[in-house]
Amino acid sequence: MTRQSAAGEPPARPHGRSRWTSFVADATTPDKVSRGLHEASNPGHRLRVEHDQHTLLIHLSDEDSHGWTTIAVDRGTR
């Protein structure tokens, strides 16, 4: 059960989470550039970033890697 936060307080963290995990680069050979990241404890949960002069696109897979959420960031106004 999650504790409710009072108005104006940040959301309460779920119980049972002992620590944060990180996204890490795939193992690569010295002559190959890694272009993707995956959650250290869940390789199916992936992250990729694309960019050009105007926009950053952040692609985040679902926890089970069946779909993607894309976040677009305008570089000029972020």
Image (spheres, rainbow, N blue to C red):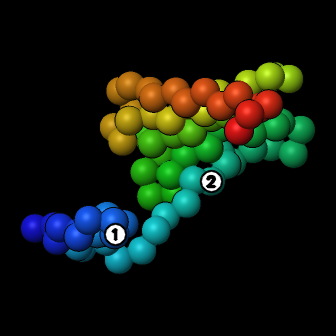
Residue 51 place in picture, x, y as percent: 76, 27
**Image label count:** 2
Crowding at label 2, few (<14), some or many (≥20) Cα neighbours within 10 Å? some
Give the labeled residue for mark 1.
Answer: 9
Does residue 61 sit above or below 53 in this rendering?
below
Q: Is residue 46 left or right of residue 31?
A: left
User: Residue at coordinates 35% horizontally, 27% vertically from top-left?
Assistant: 66
Mark 1 vs mark 2: in front:
1
Give the labeled residue for mark 2.
Answer: 24
* Separation of residues labelled 1 and 2 (CA atoms): 31 Å
User: Residue at coordinates 65% horizontally, 31% vertically from top-left?
Assistant: 73
User: Residue at coordinates 74% horizontally, 34% vertically from top-left?
Assistant: 77
State the image quarter where residue 8 is shown.
bottom left
The answer to whether residue 14 shows anywhere in this view is no
Residue 48 place in picture, x, y as percent: 62, 34
> Is tag 1's residue or tag 2's residue first in the polypeptide sequence?
1
Does residue 11 sit above or below 33 in this rendering?
below
Specify the amino acid type for callout 1: Glu
For numbered disc 1, what is the local secondary structure? loop
Crowding at label 1, few (<14), some or many (≥20) Cα neighbours within 10 Å? few
Specify the amino acid type for callout 2: Val
- Name of the residue lying farthest toward the bottom: 18
Which quarter of the figure is the C terminus placed in?
top right
Q: Is residue 1 left or right of residue 42?
A: left
For numbered disc 2, what is the local secondary structure? strand
